Amino acid sequence: MSLVPPYIEALRPYEAGRTIESVRQQYGLGHIAKLASNENPLGASPKAVDALTHTLQNLNLYPNGGLDLRAVLASEYEVKVENVIAGSGSEGIMSNIIRTFLCDEDEVLTTEAAFIGFQVLAKSRGVKYRTVPYRDWHYDLPALASEINERTKIVYLANPNNPTGTIFTRQEFDVFYRHVPERVLIILDEAYFEYAKDNPRYPDSMHYRYDNVITLRTFSKIYGLAGIRIGYGFAHEELIGNLLKVKLPFEPNTLAQAAGIGALADKEFLHRSLELNARGLQLLTSSLRDLGLTVVASEANFVMVVLPDDEQAASLTNDLLTHGVIVRPLKAFGLPQCVRISTGTDEENQRCVEALAKCHAKMGV
Ligand SMILES: Cc1ncc(COP(=O)(O)O)c(C=O)c1O
């Protein structure tokens, strides 16, 4: 008899993308462009690094559970500290949401091929996981609303979405929200919100708050702090209060919290990162379309390319490695015919386009 529940046995282990080192060794190449994990190609926010180095002398002391960062966020967003949580990345908070709110008979509802991190967390809880297909690579909010039943407990929506890069609009969300009973918790994952926030159609969820909505954000993307694990969320104080009971008492760690506070003050880095990303999106989208490839218009820091079939997606991913360009195949997400390419530095983007042109010519599609 297995010691492991069947729903854990059925999980596929997370397949991390190729590392720079492994590709460098395999192909004997110099510079590798890692455009696979939606990281910030400029590195970490300098103010974040500065702030964390100043806390190094306090590492003998336990952290305070994210209280300092929560206070800074509360003041910046004009909410109460009780409405804010900080955790080990937004995935750390997502994991606590799964543990806090789901009972065995509850169901989770989201789109097909949703962000892989959420898929794994929800499936590891052993509850029923239901999905609705994309409509033109967008969340189909009307279809999701009609799929809510008496067992639905959590609806997960990423906006902008990973891996498609698309958004749903404020108007679409408002219509959807009217169909969601109060007993259903909506996770609004806004990991890429900084990239989309200047789009007037984007429903930045801090502009309005609902009692059954949890907004999740992260320092991993635009602030370049993926390696230190720091994210945050906003919700009704009752929801946050229950999450605080469940989370590890000393999460987030001291360095992560300091880095988050430093990053929030780094408006110059934010601005520079946004400008670089806008150039990258423009170049990747237009050049790849010029090659005849199908590229989904993106509001984040990556683009999704839809290939004619699974084999072509796999062979494109492998061919790009030989040119020193790492992209993300989306088979594990549930989209084996697609690849995702993150924006890099200007040089990396250019190199990616040139490599893609060569690989594409070889494929003859
Ligand atoms: C939609 C989405 N949510 C959450 C995350 C994870 O963020 P964090 O590093 O804060 O756990 C990612 C990272 O790729 C993401 O794409």
Image: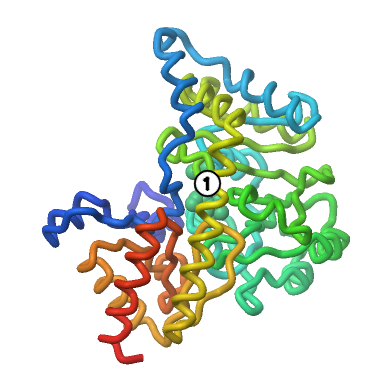
> How did the renderer colour the structure?
rainbow
Q: Give coordinates of residue 29: x percent, y percent.
A: 16, 58
Quadrant including the C terminus: bottom left
Q: Nearer the viewer, residue 166 or 276?
A: 276
Q: Residue at x 24, y 62 (%)?
A: 324
Asked which secondary structure carries label 1, the reply is helix
Q: Is residue 21 above or below residue 239?
A: below
Q: Give coordinates of residue 222: x percent, y percent.
A: 53, 44
Q: Is residue 93 above or below residue 265?
A: below
Q: Residue at x 46, y 30 (%)?
A: 46
Q: Amino acid at mark 1?
A: Ser
Specify whether 5 is left or right of 128.
left
User: Which residue in the structure is indicated by mark 1?
Assistant: 273
Q: Residue at x 35, y 58 (%)?
A: 348
Q: Is residue 206 above or below residue 127?
A: above
Q: Is residue 234 above or below residue 161?
A: above
